[in-house]
Amino acid sequence: MVGGLCGGGPQKPVTDGRICVAIVTYNSSRYIGRCLQTVLRQEGVEIEVVVVDNASTDGTREILREFGGQIRTVECVRNLGFAEAQNRAIRSSTAEWVLTLNPDVLLLPGFIRRLQDAGASDPSAGTVCGKLLSIGPGFHPLPEPRIDSTGIFFTPAMRHFDRGWHQPDQASFENMEYVFGASAAAALFRRRMIDDVAVEGSFFDPDFFVYREDADVAWRAQLLGWRCIYTPAAVAYHVRSVTPGNRRSVPAAINMHCVKNRFLMRIKNVTAGVYRRHWLPMTLRDLVVLGGSIFLEPASLAAFWHVARGLPRAMRQRRLIMSRRRVPDDVLAEWFSFEPAAQPIHAAATHEGGRKVLSPAVSLAVE
């Protein structure tokens, strides 16, 4: 184990083809031990494990030290937030692939290898995700298997959701297909894509601090022509603490970041064509968010101050992103649907399983 302050430092050369498992912990003692056990038991892949601890005080660091040289740790003197801590982990490695992993995830055998196999089969894929199933707090099994995530999708109101969330796992979402993006709770990213979509040296936007940073990356990747593959062969379990219906039980700071990041993400990524097509549901949702902040969540009003403060940087990032976009508006706009959209691999446009299936995107060479 290599300890230290969160200060960057030189990158550690690694073998080509190795996968870096990047985990961010913050008072994660309840979960991190079992999570790491399932990571270290993965077979058929060469991995390095980097854990960035965001100033935990609950015994997390003591648990990490028990793993000795099996993992590499970076100990931060303050909480940097998920986005920047993940950036530190990603920069500390030169592995060909990076698996971002939450400490409250349990991997089933073969999870990482199956993600890598899916990604290796398609050079246009910058992201790969598997089927995440829900598991209760403390990793207690649920009475009925339910889906946590099979990738993420955006609605025309610019809300993003996990595909299949809370649906029974009954032979659904069983096809490998392209999706808009992946939940960073367990997502495999290609290094070439990480380097390509990073803005001002950051893969995840540090201004987001926590939440929605994976949706921001997914949108940016779509703009630059990178695909995201969903493979049902890779299965893991995830304890979800924030859901669409439990805002009142979530800390006020988390809700504030969610509101802030909704607007920062759109400032950076929405295109004129997408806005023209979806301006009405987008505007109606904005009014709901504003009204909710005023009357139900006054602590979230601080989000608008943070957006105003971060506007110059967000606009600068927008110019950088739009100067390099490779996908036309008509292709992007189709992804925004009130149904969980997907795109068949090597197939024509169709509708199946009650889910909207898009026509294949334009073929883009990403060198």
Image: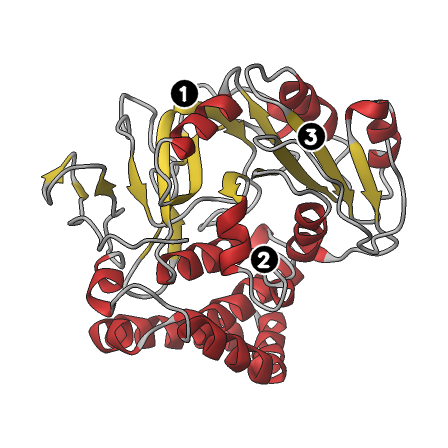
Q: Is residue 246 visible?
A: no
Residue 214 in picture, x, y percent from top left: 51, 52
Q: Identify the residue at horizontal 42%, vertical 56% (top origin).
A: 221
**299 or 357: nearer the eye?**
357
Q: Pointers 3 and 2 in contact (CB under 8 A)? A: no
Residue 229 in picture, x, y percent from top left: 36, 39
Q: Amino acid at mark 2?
A: Phe
> Which element type, helix, strand or loop, lies under badge 2?
loop
Residue 144, disc: 1
Q: Amino acid at mark 3?
A: Glu
Q: Identify the residue at horizontal 78%, vertical 55% (top origin).
A: 79
Residue 224 in picture, x, y percent from top left: 38, 61
Q: Quadrant of the N terminus?
A: top right
> Which element type, helix, strand or loop, lies under badge 1?
loop
Q: Identify the residue at horizontal 63%, vertical 63% (top origin).
A: 201
Q: Identify the residue at horizontal 26%, vertical 56% (top origin).
A: 335
* In this rendering, position of residue 260 left or right of residue 66: left
Residue 204, disc: 2
Spatial CA span between label 2 and label 1: 34 Å
**313 or 298: nearer the eye?**
313
Q: Pointers 1 and 3 in contact (CB under 8 A)? A: no
Whichever of callouts 3 and 2 sits on the residue coming sooner in the sequence is 3
- Is 141 drawn above or below residue 7 in the view shown? above
Residue 134, disc: none
Q: Which residue is mark 3?
A: 48
> Which element type, helix, strand or loop, lies under badge 3?
strand
Mark 3 or 2, closer to the camera? 3
Whichever of callouts 1 and 3 sits on the residue coming sooner in the sequence is 3
